[in-house]
Amino acid sequence: MTTGRLAGGLLPLLGRGSTIAALVVVVALPFAFIALQAVFPEIGAGSFARPLAHLATVLRSEDFATQTRNTLALGAGVVVASFAVGVPLAALRALTRLPGALIWDLVFLVPFMIPPYIATLGWIMTLQPAGYLQQLTGVSLGPQLFSFPGIVAVMTLHCFPVVYFAASRAFTAIGARTSDASRVFGAGPLRAFWRVTLPLATPALAASGLLVFAMTIEEYGTPAVLGARFGFDVLVTGIDTSLSDWPIDLPKAALLSIALIALSLAAFALQRWVATRRDAGVVGGKAARAATRPLCGWALPVLVLFAAVAFVSTGLPLLAILATALSRTISGGLTPDNLGLGNFRAVLADSSGALSALGTSFGLGLISAVMAGVLGLAVAFTTARRGSRGGRRAPGAALIDALSMLPNAAPGVVVALGLILLWNQPALPATPYNTLAILVLAYVCILLPQPVRYTVAAFQQVDPALEAAARVHGAGPARAAWRVLVPLVAPSVLAAMLLVFTVAARELVASLLVAPVGVDTIGTYIWRQFDQGSMGEGMAVAFLAIVATTLVPIVILSAMRRLEMPG
């Protein structure tokens, strides 16, 4: 009995220790070295001299002020525009009997599945001078595209689904009955929506706005491609310039990274304040089917609106990507003689390393998904599972929770900088830098919060009595967890791993900064092909990547659902 108790206490302790150690290596140390580099500019040479000597120079520099203003303006602009597009669509979806509602939900998921840098390249091919739009209609929108409103519009088309899905779920929970009370007292439909329904959806809108803001300020590809044409720099591009242009300025890059993290944390604080300053409780203990209204004569205009948004956000970028992939030469234009499968054949023949880039990205995505899934499962098991003493969390759970969520506050470029600073220390006896392992570390760090969230939610739905029953029948903690808890949360872990695979396989900014010399991923290959003017093969790889990383998760999840169905 004593041995069993010792093992029962030792195994969880070892598990927590291993989880904390993994999080320290994957998450804590890269962020710590960013902070150290920001404070001690000469730490790379092993010196702690002249702390914060770089701070005054960076803060007084004109480019820092400009990049910060541009970052805030871009983030705020995309949030406002995403609300302008997503909220009306969500209200129509949730509060009316919209024909084909589920189909529209699926269609609006597609822009979110297309990496923003790939969609941006598609928009450039469409709207630039002599682009596809001018070839077909004689109209060129190049000046409008390469402008601040153009960047906001392109990024809004990628981000508005976040607002749409969050707001539609909130409006569905609220229903039309709450606004009906105000209608009884004389309010019109728009006034009732503005004064009753919309304020009750404040928490969901604030959360989606925070996510859109974070996605915008951490995006690298769109500002780098479009902003470079008219001198629009943001903090992310400033960090990249500090790391890639000679002379390399690591202290400045670290300080810009701290500024970017501070903006993310400030946005989170604002979201919390907005969401908690009023009571938005609308869901009671009695479930009721949300009342919806018929569209009547407005059905056709509403369907045209949904179709137009779907075509602009999904159809046009995909058509531009496919047209470029089928073009033998870009100068040949959209003519039958210039279209063919030559670029796809070149990709399959691996004449320029395209097939190798696809294989590298899919392999790294798979490894990263497994590692992030396992680490996320360990984190969730510690943070979501309550102990037997009064339902308290296990010791160290708060630290593990904080470390696992830390990447939420940092864009991929910041994570990449932390890995560069950490693994290039002269005192290290060995380093994963300049190997494929550094890419795996980057992907796991960036995407770890996703499997943690999924798995924590799954653990919270498991009745503690199930584990207790296994313990009563003689199973130890490890056996009870392996035979009871893990199978119950496995579907959620697999879904999170599929998400990690999808994003990691197409990641761009961290891959550009830390990929080993001579190694291309999907993101770096497409980026370099476009930069070198070889758009055809780059877009062929982009199209294949979009198809593969969209269909593979769908096929696997569909197979899982069929296996779960009885009979």
Image (tube, rainbow, N blue to C red):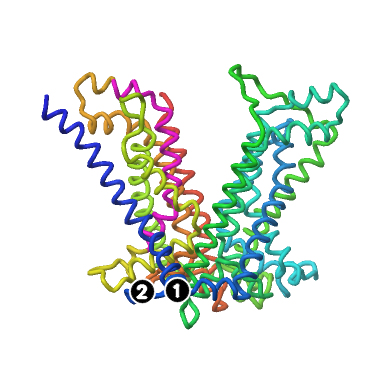
State whether residue 339 appears in this view. Answer: no
Q: Quadrant of the C terminus?
A: top left
The residue where tag 2 is placed is 44
Q: Position of residue 185 (x, y in %)?
A: 86, 23
- In the rendered view, would you say 96 is above or below 433? above
Q: Quadrant of the N terminus?
A: top left
Find residue 241 and report its horizontal and vertical position in percent: 53, 75
Residue at x 50% of width, y 62% of height: 258
Within 10 Å of disc 1 (Cα), the crowding (few <14, some 14-19, many 20+) is many
- Identified at 37% across, 39% down, the residue is 380
**In the rendered view, does 29 fall on the left or right side of 110?**
left
Amino acid type for the residue under numbered disc 1: Leu
- Is residue 324 depicted above or below 481 in this figure? below
To which residue does mark 1 refer? 250
Quarter of the rendering containing residue 517? bottom left
Give yes or no for residue 460 being in the magenta stretch.
yes
Secondary structure predominantly adopted by residues drawn in magenta: helix
Q: Is residue 173 above or below residue 553?
A: above
Q: Quadrant of residue 75?
A: bottom right
The amino acid type found where label 2 is placed reads Gly
Q: Rate crowding at label 2 as few (under 14), some (14 to 19) or many (20 or more) other CA atoms within 10 Å.
A: some
In-front residue for pair 184/439? 184
State the residue lying farthest toward the top: 286
Q: Is residue 138 left or right of residue 18?
A: right
Magenta highlight range: 439-468
Q: Secondary structure at mark 2?
A: helix
Work out whether residue 537 or residue 284 is closer to the camera in this orientation and state it. Answer: 284
Q: Is residue 500 above or below residue 483?
A: below
Mark 2 near mark 1, Cβ–Cβ under 8 Å? yes
Q: Secondary structure at mark 1?
A: helix
The residue lying at 42 percent from left, 44 percent from top is 451
